[in-house]
Image: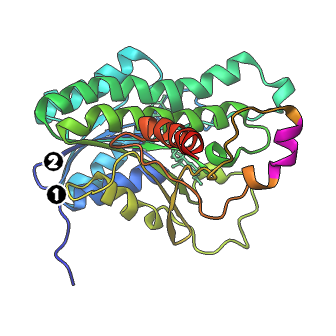
Amino acid sequence: MSAALRFDDRVAVITGGGRGLGREYALLLADRGAKVVVNDVGGTLTGDGADAGPASAVVGEITEAGGQAVACTESVATAEGGQAIIEAALREFGRIDILIHNAGNVRRAPLAQMSYEDFDAVLDVHLRGAFHVVRPAFAAMTEAGYGRIVLTSSIGGLYGNHDVANYGVAKAGIIGLSNVAALEGAASNVVSNVIVPAAVTRMAEGLDTSAYPPMGAELVAPTVGWLAHETCSVTGEIMVALAGRVARAYIGETRGVYRQAWTIEDVAENLAEIRDTADPVIFPVVPDGHADHIRYSFGMAAQAVQR
Ligand code: NAD
């Protein structure tokens, strides 16, 4: 058996760490030696209200087991809150090595009826909330020359879902933020990845989960733990963990079709080849997926000119 991967002397901030998945991440990292800031406002599923209970209960569990943790009940939904959460780590423990942005709320409505209030309330926690904590954490991490960032997307961010335009937008946007953090952090040993988790938590309220296989948060936490560990060897990637399955999700492209000129009819006639997913192309975000994508397309044009 390989040696246990530990987090001694590492400081982790976990947003939404008072319940569900975040609680599991906090307990796992603390058990492996990390000092943890358990951030949670303790509100309802829709993100209303506040309760210091969940964050302090998790801190209690950690300290009773001999670990180190502090509670922070600031909201990720504002710039000041995000700043205060990261400052709590710097003030209490002197550094920040790991940021897991996991806080989340849910507000459901069909697309045409979704209010701007519900759209904003969900973006504020998941997506702007990510920016509010990543921004100050990233500055401290790049200065220290070390950082592990894990942001939380969702199946709804990859594939959408009914009645959650707000959530789908926020969870897709998270991937864009992680990619930029991965690129800008690469030179400073700051890696950033996305977890696509699923577990039966209070977010499953109202769903019939009786036919589900075992689907606890403890089946997700080890993947997040690895992404948060010093030995994490990937950046700008997306990992999936649900019901015991761990996988990688990625953006892929078909090889595509090159022509010197196109008409609408040409697109229609070439559709099968344009959409042919056999032999796909994947451009890793780091070191330079952006330029690789452009180079690949230019390469097809250059080859056609040579012929
Ligand atoms: P949960 O409701 O059990 O826990 C989320 C926690 O975030 C709560 O304790 C809540 O108080 C806290 N929170 C909400 N708004 C906050 C704010 N503004 N500032 C600080 N804390 C705040 O939910 P969960 O199922 O553990 O979800 C955790 C994350 O995983 C979320 O981002 C969620 O979207 C994502 N996710 C969960 C599932 C799933 O199957 N449970 C699936 C996909 C994605």
Q: Residue 290, located in which quarter of the rendered image? A: top left
At label 2, the amino acid type is Arg
Magenta stretch bounds: 265-271
Q: Is residue 204 above or below residue 17?
A: below
Q: Find out whether the residues at labels 2 and 1 contact each other: C-beta distance under 8 Å.
A: yes
Nearer-N-terminus badge (2/1): 2
Q: For this rendering, which residue is in front, 251 or 63?
A: 251
Q: Is residue 215 left or right of residue 85?
A: right
Give the structural element (helix, strand or loop) at label 2: loop
Q: Main secondary structure of the magenta part?
A: helix
Near mark 2 (Cα within 10 A), the count class, few <14, some 14-19 or many ≥20, is many
Residue 212 point in image, percent of width and height: 68, 71
Q: Residue 167 placed where, x, y %?
A: 65, 35
Q: Circle 2 sits on which residue?
A: 10
Q: Nearer the viewer, residue 230 or 20?
A: 230
Image point (49%, 40%), residue name: 293
Q: Which mark is residue 236?
A: none
Q: Is residue 19 magenta?
A: no
| Dot 1: element | loop
Residue sticking out furthest to the bottom: 1
| Residue 280: percent from left, percent from top | 59, 58
Residue at the spot of label 1? 33
Marks 2 and 1: which is nearer the front?
Answer: 2
Amino acid, disc 1? Gly
